[in-house]
Amino acid sequence: MEELGLLMQGFGVALQPENIVLMIAGITLGVLIGVLPGLGGANGIAILLPLTFAMSPVSAVIMLSCIYWGALFGGAITSILFNIPGEPWSVATTFDGYPMAQQGRAGEALTAAFTSSFVGALVAVVMITFIAPVVAQFALNFGPPEFFAVLFLSFAAFVGMGRGSPVKTLMSMMFGFLLAAVGMDAMTGQLRMTFGEPELMRGFDFLVAVIGLFGVSEILSSIEDGLRFKGQKAKIDMAVVLRTWRELPRHWAISVRSSLVGCWMGITPAGATPASFMSYGIARRISKHREDFGKGRIEGVIAPETAAHAAGTSALLPMLTLGVPGSPTAAVLLGGLIMWGLQPGPMLFVEQKDFVWGLIASMYLGNVVGLIIVLVAVPWFAAILRVPFSIIAALILVVCAIGAFTVNNATFDIALMLVFGIIGYVLKKLDYPLAPLVLALVLGDRTEEAFRQSLLVSGGEMSIFFSSWLSTGIMTAGIALLIYPLWGMIRGGGKPATAA
Amino acid sequence: MSMAMQRVTGAEPQDMVHAPDGMAATMNTVFVPAREDAAGVPMRTMEIGTSLFFAAAGAVAIWDSARIGAGWGADGPQSGYFPFWIGVLLVLAATFNLVGVARATTPRRPVEVPMFLTWEQARTVATVFIPTTIFVAAVPFTGIYVASALLVAWFMSRLGEFSLTRAVPAGVAAALVTFVVFETWFLVALPKGPVETFLGF
């Protein structure tokens, strides 16, 4: 049980007073970000990332990951009270959460949502504690072909397991890879696709892209129908919390199942959103009261929230151990690691024990702190949405612009952010998934590097990706995932999936 | 709520269709909602445009990669090797999507053409988008603080129906708070313009 010793050491790091303050600040900010339209986990962290350069990496990652947990909690508030999913993974929570609030059971729904989130996260953190070191140990033996295979598998998983059209997923992803390739080629120093434009030599920074794609575009689509927030009253008192807590253990089976679904979907980069839908669907199918789902059943809140939080948390496992993030937010955190001068991947567990275990310990603490904060402060967070949209929208746009500027201290990046905002707005409306684009942009250089290094070793033979049993296995799984939607199309009478 | 968010799953609870007067529609009621704002940019047009955009981006990548060398150099794969094939994949996927859109049957009645954006919606989006564009364009000249104050004041008075006597002070206050937080607290220098220079920053 070496992990427990290291974990205790991590608690020593996480429990330092300044880190606890950062944790509370991060959670509070995160819930705020999760509640506000146009600010989510990924771009909230992207905006704040440049401000953390002066901090120690452990403190910075504790604060930023706590923003992530806070955003996961915050998504539930708007879903239940306002029927507005603050985050895509809380869409499934609206199905039963909002009807519950309409029936005056908002407190019950919120307590169930927060507690389920907490349970899901806890299961995922326990899993990370014990599995991450094993995976990292294993990954120490990876060479470039194995790394490329893992990256290939992650991207193939988007195509094979994503909810939308596989072709659109592929396009979004390839566009991300192209954007990543713009600028200086790190291996040869050659300029690529810059067309003599000096501003493009830096390449496209993924932070700027994330702020535009998720922030600006969200503001544009929120205003489309003349946004008015019409919400239910939120009031949570101790009596409601205790009553709901007494009821929750009856649904333990749903919690366990949803946690497992979430953990699995979080590790593969399919992510929190499909996990929440899948586990809602399973809970509904298995339930004896199937027809009551959508009318305010508490199971319909427990299932998606548990899964979403478990998935969101376990998305950090591949990020820490392999350097392959499982979600856009994890990708932004990965970008943070690189900026703070850490090399993501298995060596992190060997060289940066304090960092890794401090982070893992902070996940335990952060979720406890988060649960307390949201239970206590729900009415205040809900009140934020009563601030007129004209004020919120302007402030969010200003914050986004500042965030984009601070990445490279370039006003050009603010314009770029706006362009990404338009791209994100159009793509989202046409059901193109944005997560593959962001992940390809973040991982493009590493993918290319692994690919080229492998080919260098083999002298250009593609067979190197099938030279060891490990890379062969991973590549085969990836290819299977790529072929899977094709199979569905053939069986569906050759109809292209884009028709959906 | 945006459309994309609503359409994410097939598992939503099915609501009864209601006529505008609140009566539930029966099975054989043909209910065509009266829509005055149906005109706009059709989904199909945007779908085609986006595919063409992606195909063009892929083509540019192929062309530029071929220019710098997309083959096998003396020291391994050349710089253009990876982007070249990414470009090829992008062009292929975009073409495939384009064929799919082209083959999809057009709805019989024009009323059913799915809209990407109705003109009504486009106007609303423009009320946010145009000031934002001006804001972004102004930052290099006015600095971010003056531009932010103006943006907040404009949004509040135009979109939020606040009076100027409330919107302008609110804008200035937002800029001042931003200034204190970033310049003095986080020690991050943001773009400044003539006003800040005049004030001695």
Image (cartoon, helix red, strand yellow):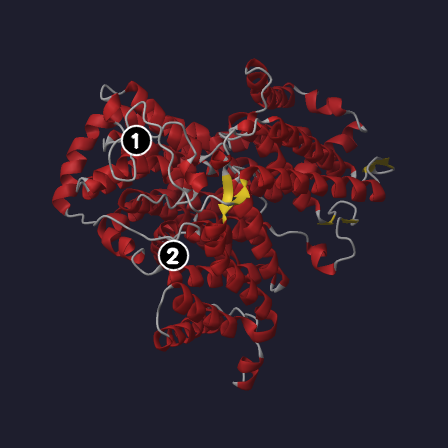
Instruction: Residue A488 in the image: state x and y as whole percent.
Output: 55, 18
Q: Look at the image and tell me whether residue A96 can be seen.
A: yes
Q: Can residue A410 be seen here? A: no
Vertical placement of B184 versus A411: above or below?
Answer: below
Residue at the extreme right: B74
Give residue A286's quadrant in the image: top left
Q: Residues within 10 Å of mark 2 (few under 14, many from 20)?
A: many
Percent of width and height locating residue A102: 21, 41
Label number found at residue B15 = 1
Where does residue A363 sit, x and y in percent of width and height?
38, 43
Position of A229 compared to A450: left or right?
Answer: left
In which quadrant is the C terminus of chain B drawn? Answer: bottom right
| Left or right of residue A116: residue B124 | right
Label 2 sits on what residue type? Leu
Discs 1, 2: same chain: no
**Distance of label 1 from label 2 (alpha carbons):** 45 Å
Mark 1 Cα shell of 10 Å, populated few (<14), some (14-19), many (≥20): few
Q: Which residue is mark 2?
A: A22
Q: Amino acid at mark 1?
A: Asp
Helix, strand or loop status at disc 2: helix
Mark carried by residue B201 = none
Which residue occupies the foreground of this view, A42 or A456?
Answer: A42
Closer to us: A215 or A43? A215
Q: Left or right of A240: which side holds B67?
A: right
How many numbered callouts?
Answer: 2
Chain of the residue displaying label 2:
A
Foreground: disc 1 or disc 2: 1
